[in-house]
Amino acid sequence: MLHYRHSWADQQKTIVFLHAAGFDGRIWKQAAEQLSDFHCVSPDLPGHGQSKDVPVTDFDAASDAVAELIGNLGNAPVCLAGLSMGSYIGFRLLTRHPDLVESAVFSGFQHVPIQVSGVVRALMTASSFMMNSKKNREKMARSLGVNDPALVSQRGGRPNASSKIMRKISALALDFDVTADLKSIETPTLVLAGETEHPAILSALPAFQSGMPHCAARIVPGLGHGWIATEPDLFATALRAWFLQEPLPDGLADVAEG
């Protein structure tokens, strides 16, 4: 089973946080501190952190691993929050185990494959090996607004995920295609993206909003893929509002219908 951390276990509602590739559940510590009115659960996803021995095959299998964790927690349905890789896995959880999730918030993902050249894929492969360097990992983290260097490494300095795992996750993300699943998602879902995200992620927002029966999409003005780290207060406020069915914060901009 996936390793996880949790806090505020006496609260009635549970949020399960799904982290981005290259990090682990510790990335959500700041969010959990601001959401003390929820039981906050932060697993290390397959191939990452203390779940490094859980195999990474595809996002479906990863979502099944999360489903197993939720089942063992014994308090389903839960609220779900995902960033980047965590959003891909979380979305597959909605399609495969909809009874386990009452509401979801995802940031930084798209609904159709991203077309990139062979050269770009080669560069992505090269960059995965660069993440073996602690210095490079810390530089990457700072570019996403994560300033705590401890969050990019395990004890002893090893990466949270191997270069092989990072290449696998990148390939799965590029090829992600859930167009056919959008209409079947009944879970209330908020999809977010920073204003300076990859164009494919931004163009997906109206598709999610119009294609899913109970979906809202919003943009975080002036920020990018790591906006959750740079604006943790806004993130926590957005989660609380969506999960408690309250008005969303003014710091989020509307998305026009596609």
Image (cartoon, helix red, strand yellow):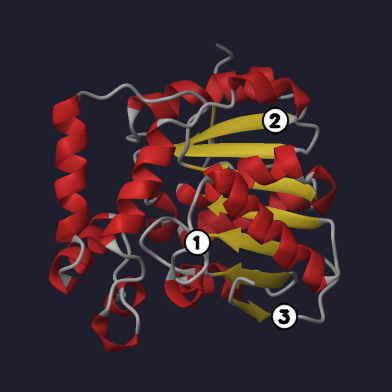
Cα distance between the residues tagged 2 and 3: 28 Å
Residue located 40% across and 60% down the image: 229
Q: Which three-letter amino acid code belongs to the residue tagged 2?
A: Cys
Question: What is the secondary structure assignment of the residue under circle 3?
Answer: loop
Dot 2 corresponds to which residue?
A: 215
Dot 1 corresponds to which residue?
A: 55
Residue 214: image quadrant is: top right
Dot 3 corresponds to which residue?
A: 8
Q: Residue furthest top?
A: 258
Left or right placement of residue 204 versus residue 135 in this view: right
Cα distance between the residues tagged 3 and 1: 29 Å
Q: Which three-letter amino acid code belongs to the residue tagged 3?
A: Trp
Cα distance between the residues tagged 1 and 2: 31 Å
Q: Residue 129 at x, y = what percent?
A: 17, 57
Question: What is the secondary structure assignment of the residue under circle 2?
Answer: strand
Residue located 81% across and 75% down the image: 11
Residue 142 seen in this snapshot: yes
Left or right placement of residue 242 versus residue 85 in this view: right
Question: What is the secondary structure assignment of the residue under circle 1?
Answer: loop
Left or right placement of residue 244 versus residue 106 in this view: right
Name the image quarter holding the C terminus.
top right
Q: Which three-letter amino acid code belongs to the residue tagged 1?
A: Pro
Label 2 Cα neighbours within 10 Å, binned few <14 / some 14-19 / many ≥20: many
